[in-house]
Amino acid sequence: MHTTQTLKSSDFAFYLNGNSSSIQEVFPNFNYRDRIGIVVHTSGGSIGASTLYMAAITNFYNYFRSKLGNENEKLRIYPDYYVFHVGNKKHMDHFWMDIYPSHKEVIVKGDSNELLNAINDRGITRLLIEQAPKKSKDYTSEAYNSAVYRIDTAVMFSRSSSPYNFTGQVTGPPIIEKYIKDSLNRTDDLDESMYSIFRPSSLIDENGKIVESFRHLTMEEALRMLASPFKNPSQI
């Protein structure tokens, strides 16, 4: 819960289609019961959405702000946000990003059905997907329908650049960049010397702020993108 001491909602600015916006427009009807799932398939992949999900975490804590603390009579709580690491390893440690406890870092080694089942099992309602080509999908009807009728919002992000045809942007405070560096240092095979790979100068605006971009997806697009990191049928 360390971010409750350093982040507040006014630290973030949202834009949709070039117009000033809010997290409630990015995630319509967003509330503390929402469960965010971040799907990554490359090392440090989630960094491309770090400001977006830190804004969501900050919004979650707004519902409990006066009750929070580590004392016995206070509320110690974390949002049910999960990172789904596609492949054989954890692509980054997210402790410093307030993704905690560690069981919320989910490694998915199987196929796209296993990934979708993992997302469904955790009741994800907002899905953030690292950019990948869309491929034909082969989900069970049970898994497919569970996702389609439960997930309210799906967005695509890119690890270190702006995704194609992006619809939204978000900026945040500098402390998030410190948390990213701390996360890199906490991860095997990564360290903060690699920070500029994930945060190149092309993402910095005229005010010196990192600008993250994202694109809203239909559920059909999202489910086809989820299939991409696996050896499924040919790209469409």
Image (cartoon, helix red, strand yellow):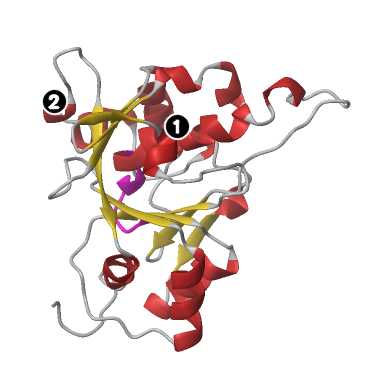
Residue 55 tag number:
1
Whether tag 2 and tag 1 are in contact, CB under 8 A, the answer is: no
Q: Is residue 107 above or below residue 101?
A: below
The type of residue carrying mark 2 is Ser
Q: Position of residue 20 (x, y in %)?
A: 28, 27
Instruction: Let me know if residue 41 is in the magenta part.
Output: yes
The residue range painted magenta reads 39-47
Helix, strand or loop under label 2 = helix
Q: Nearer the viewer, residue 36 or 14?
A: 14
Q: Is residue 94 magenta?
A: no
**Label 2 packing within 10 angstroms: few (<14), some (14-19), many (20+):** few
- Under tag 1, what secondary structure? helix
Q: Nearer the viewer, residue 219 or 138?
A: 219
Q: Is residue 106 left or right of residue 218?
A: right
Give how far across and how far down residue 45 sits, in percent: 31, 48
**Residue occupying the point 16% across, 41% down:** 162
Numbered disc total: 2
Cα separation between marks 2 and 1: 22 Å
Q: Which residue corresponds to mark 2?
A: 201
On-image quarter of the N terminus: top right
Percent across and percent down for residue 90 are 43, 54
The answer to whether 181 appears left or right of 80 in the picture is left
Q: Quadrant of residue 166?
A: top left
Residue 88 vs residue 177, the one in the foreground: 177
